[in-house]
C-alpha cells in the first residue's frame, strides 16, 4: 500500500543515515556472518538492482537492538561464452544496529538472539540466497568488527568476536575489523585494530588476555601477527617509531625482522643513530624470549642490519632431509673434490606463494668424503644470460654450514627458497642454473625443467633468494 511503502522507505532512509553517523562518530562494530540458507524456488532481481526485504517487527523485542535492515543484492551475470545462459547470483545483506551503551556481554547476547529471530524470515523471503554471498553486519557506535565465515552458526563464536571488539574499543581502539574464527585452525581469527599510537601497548595486553590475535596500527607504528600479541614486542615497535627522523616502524611477528624507515639517505648519521639505539635496547626480548633482527633503512637509500639488544641467536645447522639415520661423522674423511661430486637439479615445489627448488650433489667416489658449505648458484634466463640483479641471501640469519661426511653413492642436498613473482608480460624467468658444489670450482649448468611440470623457475631480476648449506640428502 502506498502509505506503508512510504513509511518503510522513510524508516530505511533514517537507518542508513543513522548507520553513517555511527560509523563517522568513532569506533564502530561491524560483523559479517554467512549462513547456509536452504535453497528453494524464489524470485530474481534485475541486474544491478537491490530490494529491501520486508521483515516483521519481531526483532524489536530483542534487547539492545536498535534497527535491522535486510537487502536482497542478487544480480544477473551474463554468460561468458556464446550461447551460454545468464546466471543469477543470489545474495542478501543484513545490517543490524545495536545500542551504543551495550557491554560486550550484552552485545554478544543481542547478536545471538537477533540472528535467531531473523534467520527464518530471511529463508522465507530470499530462499535462493547463496551461503557464500549472505552476510550479517553488526554496528555499534564505539567499535567496528567484520565477521565473514560461511555457514557460521550464530552462536558463541560470533558473540565472542563482538565482545572482544567492544573490549578493544573500551581500551582505546577507534576501529576493529575481524572475522569470527580462522578456518584453518578453528581458533579466534585476527582482528585489525586502529588506535592512537599511545594506546597500542594497552590494546595488545587486552587482546592477549582475551586470546585474540590482532594487527595493531597507530601513528607511525604497525604490529602485525597471526598469533596472540606480545605486548613487549608492541612496546618496542612504538618506541622505535618515536625515535628522531623515523617515519615508520613495522614488525610482522614472529618470523620477520623489525623494519624501521628513517627520513635519510645513505651515509646520513641518523641511520646509524637509530641502529645503535636498537642495539642497546634492553626491553626486548622478555615475553617471547627469542632474539629479534632489525633493519634500519633510509627513505633515500642506506641500510643497517643488526639484532635488538645486541642479542644474536644461537648458531643453527641445516637439518637432514628425510628421516634416515644420520650418516657417520668420520673425522678422518678427506674433503670432497669437485671431481668427486655429480651435481643435479632435484626438483621444485610451490605452495601459498612460496617456492622451493632442490640441488643434489652425489658422491661418485669409492670412499666417503666431507663437504661443508653453501653451493655457489647463478641464475640464467632463456637467452643464457646471467640474471645479475637476483639477490642471494643466507637461508636463515643464524644458520651456519655443518661438515657432512657423504658415503659413496649418496647425495647431499641444498634448498633454494624464494617468493612467487608475477610472470605477466613474459619477463625473463630462470631456465638454467650455474651451480658449483664447492665455491670457486668450475660450475655445472643445470636445466630446471620438470617432467610433466614447470619448465622454468619464476625467479626474475630483483628477486631475493635464500640458499641453504649442504645437508644429508634423501636416497635416490
Image (cartoon, rainbow, N blue to C red):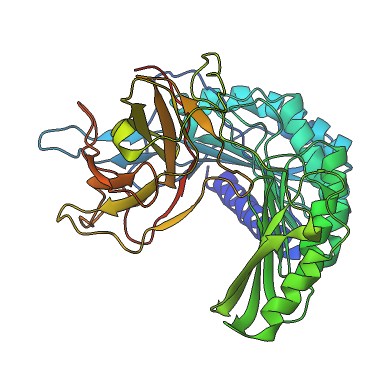
Vertical order, 396 against 142 (above or below): above
Q: Position of residue 228 (x, y in %)?
A: 76, 40
Picture quadrant of residue 361: top left
Whether residue 382 can be seen here: yes
Q: Residue at x 61, y 34 (%)?
A: 33
Q: Residue at x 59, y 31 (%)?
A: 149
Q: Quadrant of the C terminus?
A: top left
Of residues 101 and 393, the one nearer the viewer is 393
Q: Residue at x 73, y 24 (%)?
A: 155
Number of marks in the image?
Answer: 0
Position of 410 with respect to 138 (left or right) is left
Position of 86 with respect to 287 (left or right) is left
Vertical order, 51 against 280 (above or below): above
Whether residue 30 can be seen here: no
Of residues 24 and 206, the one nearer the viewer is 206
Position of 17 with respect to 208 (left or right) is left
Vertical order, 222 against 210 (above or below): below
Q: Position of residue 187 (x, y in %)?
A: 70, 28
Of residues 403 and 159, the one nearer the viewer is 403
Of residues 368 and 379, the one nearer the viewer is 368
Residue extending furthest toward the left? 82
Amino acid at each position: 500500500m502506498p502509505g506503508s511503502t512510504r513509511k518503510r522507505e522513510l524508516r530505511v532512509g533514517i537507518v542508513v543515515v543513522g548507520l553513517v553517523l555511527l560509523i563517522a562518530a568513532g569506533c564502530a562494530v561491524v560483523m559479517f556472518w554467512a549462513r547456509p540458507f536452504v535453497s528453494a524456488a524464489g524470485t530474481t532481481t534485475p541486474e544491478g538492482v537491490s530490494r529491501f526485504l520486508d521483515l516483521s517487527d519481531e526483532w524489536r523485542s530483542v534487547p539492545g537492538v536498535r534497527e535491522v535492515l535486510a537487502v536482497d543484492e542478487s544480480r544477473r551475470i551474463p554468460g561468458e561464452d556464446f550461447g551460454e545462459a545468464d546466471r543469477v547470483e543470489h545474495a542478501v545483506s543484513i545490517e543490524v544496529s545495536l545500542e551504543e551503551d551495550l557491554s560486550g556481554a550484552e552485545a554478544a547476547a543481542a547478536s545471538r538472539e537477533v540472528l535467531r529471530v531473523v534467520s527464518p524470515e530471511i529463508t522465507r523471503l530470499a530462499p535462493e540466497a547463496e551461503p557464500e554471498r549472505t552476510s550479517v553486519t553488526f554496528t555499534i557506535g564505539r567499535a567496528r568488527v567484520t565477521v565473514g565465515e560461511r555457514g557460521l552458526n550464530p552462536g558463541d563464536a560470533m558473540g565472542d568476536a563482538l565482545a572482544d571488539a567492544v573490549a578493544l574499543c573500551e581500551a582505546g581502539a577507534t576501529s576493529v575489523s575481524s572475522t569470527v574464527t580462522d578456518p584453518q585452525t578453528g581458533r579466534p581469527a585476527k582482528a585489525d585494530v586502529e588506535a592512537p599510537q599511545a594506546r597500542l601497548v594497552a590494546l595488545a595486553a587486552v587482546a592477549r588476555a582475551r586470546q585474540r590475535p590482532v594487527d595493531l596500527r597507530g601513528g607511525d607504528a604497525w604490529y602485525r601477527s597471526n598469533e596472540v600479541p606480545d605486548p613487549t614486542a608492541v612496546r618496542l615497535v612504538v618506541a622505535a617509531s618515536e625515535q628522531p627522523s623515523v617515519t615508520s616502524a613495522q614488525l610482522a611477528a614472529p618470523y620477520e625482522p623489525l623494519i624501521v624507515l628513517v627520513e635519510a639517505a645513505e651515509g646520513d648519521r641518523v641511520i646509524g643513530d637509530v641502529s645503535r639505539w636498537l642495539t642497546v635496547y634492553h626491553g626486548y626480548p622478555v615475553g617471547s624470549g627469542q632474539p629479534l633482527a632489525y633493519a634500519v633503512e633510509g627513505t633515500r637509500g642506506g641500510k643497517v642490519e643488526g639484532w635488538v639488544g645486541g642479542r644474536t641467536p644461537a648458531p643453527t645447522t641445516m637439518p637432514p632431509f628425510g628421516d634416515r639415520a644420520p650418516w657417520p661423522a668420520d673425522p678422518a674423511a678427506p674433503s670432497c673434490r669437485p671431481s668427486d661430486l655429480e651435481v643435479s637439479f632435484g626438483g621444485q615445489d610451490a605452495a601459498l606463494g612460496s617456492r622451493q627448488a632442490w640441488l643434489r650433489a652425489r658422491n661418485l667416489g669409492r670412499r666417503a668424503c666431507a663437504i661443508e658449505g653453501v653451493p655457489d648458484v647463478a641464475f640464467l634466463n632463456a637467452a643464457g644470460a646471467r640474471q645479475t640483479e637476483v639477490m642471494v641471501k643466507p637461508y636463515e640469519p643464524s644458520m651456519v654450514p655443518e661438515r657432512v661426511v657423504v658415503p659413496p653413492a649418496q647425495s647431499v642436498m641444498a634448498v633454494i627458497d624464494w617468493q612467487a613473482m608475477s610472470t605477466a608480460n613474459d619477463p625473463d624467468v630462470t631456465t638454467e642454473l650455474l651451480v658449483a658444489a664447492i665455491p670457486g670450482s668450475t660450475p655445472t649448468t643445470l636445466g630446471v625443467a620438470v617432467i610433466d611440470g614447470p619448465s622454468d623457475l619464476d625467479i626474475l631480476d630483483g628477486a631475493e633468494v635464500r640458499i641453504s648449506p649442504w645437508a644429508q640428502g634423501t636416497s635416490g
